[in-house]
C-alpha cells in the first residue's frame, strides 16, 4: 500500500471516528458524556493534528515524525484501549506509520496476548481502563515480566509524575495529534534500553 493510500485510509478513519463521536454526543443523555464526546469529536476531526499534545514530545525532532523510516521488519505494537473507536483509530494511525499492531480492550487481554507472543516490541496503553488493573499498573507489570518491551502511556484524566513511570516508557497527554503519538513511538524505538 502506498503512502498516499495509507494517508487516505487514515483520513477516512478519522472522519468516521469524528462522525461516530458526534452522533454519540447527540444520543447520550448525560451532559458530562455529551461534552466528552464533543471534545473527542473535535480532536479526531480534521483539526486533530493541530490539537495540543502533552509535553512528553517536547524533546522530539522533526525527523521523529510519521514519515521517518522504520527498520525492517516492522515492530509490533500492542494497543490497549477500552474505547473501541479510539482503539480502531490508533490501530489505523500506527499501521499507517509502518508498525504492525495487536489489540486488547483491557489489561487482562493484553497480558494474555503477551503470554502467547514473544515478538511484541511496544505497549501503547491508556491509563483509564476497566478490569483488574489500570494502564499504569499494566505498564509496570509488562516492565517486570517483559523488560525489553518499551511503553507509551496515554491519558486525558491522569497525569503521572515521571517517577511513577516504568523505565523505557513515555507519557503522552490526551488530546494529542497523530504525529505526536508516532513521534513518541519512534523516539522509544531509537532510545537505548535501560
Image: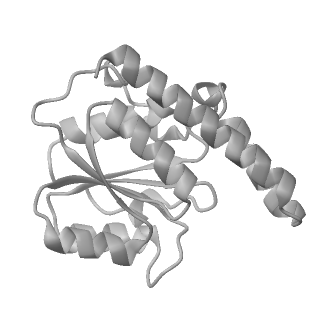
- Left or right: where does residue 171 sit relative to residue 51? left
The quarter of the picture where the N terminus appears is top left
- Left or right: where does residue 137 sit relative to residue 122? right
Residue 43 rendering spot, x and y as whole percentages: 66, 37
In the image, 28 versus 77, the foreground residue is 28
Residue at 10% from the left image edge and 32% from the top image edge:
72
From what the image shows, is residue 1 above or below residue 105? Answer: above
Residue at 14% from the left image edge and 58% from the top image edge:
148
Residue 180 rendering spot, x and y as whole percentages: 46, 33
The quarter of the picture where the C terminus appears is bottom left
Residue 188: in sight, yes or no? yes
Residue at the far bottom: name it: 132
Instruction: State which quadrant residue 117 falls in.
Output: bottom left
- Left or right: where does residue 51 sit relative to residue 67? right
Residue 52: in sight, yes or no? no
From what the image shows, is residue 181 above or below residue 158? Answer: above
Instruction: State which quadrant residue 3 falls in.
Output: top left
Residue 186 rendering spot, x and y as whole percentages: 28, 34
Residue 8 rendering spot, x and y as whole percentages: 47, 21
Instruction: State which quadrant residue 166 falls in.
Output: bottom left
Indicate how the structure is coloured in the image: one colour
Residue at 56% from the left image edge and 60% from the top image edge:
83
Amino acid at each position: 500500500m502506498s503512502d498516499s493510500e495509507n494517508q487516505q485510509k487514515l483520513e477516512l478513519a478519522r472522519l468516521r471516528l469524528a462522525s461516530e463521536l458526534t452522533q454519540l454526543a447527540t444520543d447520550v443523555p448525560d451532559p458530562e458524556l455529551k461534552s466528552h464526546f464533543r471534545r473527542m469529536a473535535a480532536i479526531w476531526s480534521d483539526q486533530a493534528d493541530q490539537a495540543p499534545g502533552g509535553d512528553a514530545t517536547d524533546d522530539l525532532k522533526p525527523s521523529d515524525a510519521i514519515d521517518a523510516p522504520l527498520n525492517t521488519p516492522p515492530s509490533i505494537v500492542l494497543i490497549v484501549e477500552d474505547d473501541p473507536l479510539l482503539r480502531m483509530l490508533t490501530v489505523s494511525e500506527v499501521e499507517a506509520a509502518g508498525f504492525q499492531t495487536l489489540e486488547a480492550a483491557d489489561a487482562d487481554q493484553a497480558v494474555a496476548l503477551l503470554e502467547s507472543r514473544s515478538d511484541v516490541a511496544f505497549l501503547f496503553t491508556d491509563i483509564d481502563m476497566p478490569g483488574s488493573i489500570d494502564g499504569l499498573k499494566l505498564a509496570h507489570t509488562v516492565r517486570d515480566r517483559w523488560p525489553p518491551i518499551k511503553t507509551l502511556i496515554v491519558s486525558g484524566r491522569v497525569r503521572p509524575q515521571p517517577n511513577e513511570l516504568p523505565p523505557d516508557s513515555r507519557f503522552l497527554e490526551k488530546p494529542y495529534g497523530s504525529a505526536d503519538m508516532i513521534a513518541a513511538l519512534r523516539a522509544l524505538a531509537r532510545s537505548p534500553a535501560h
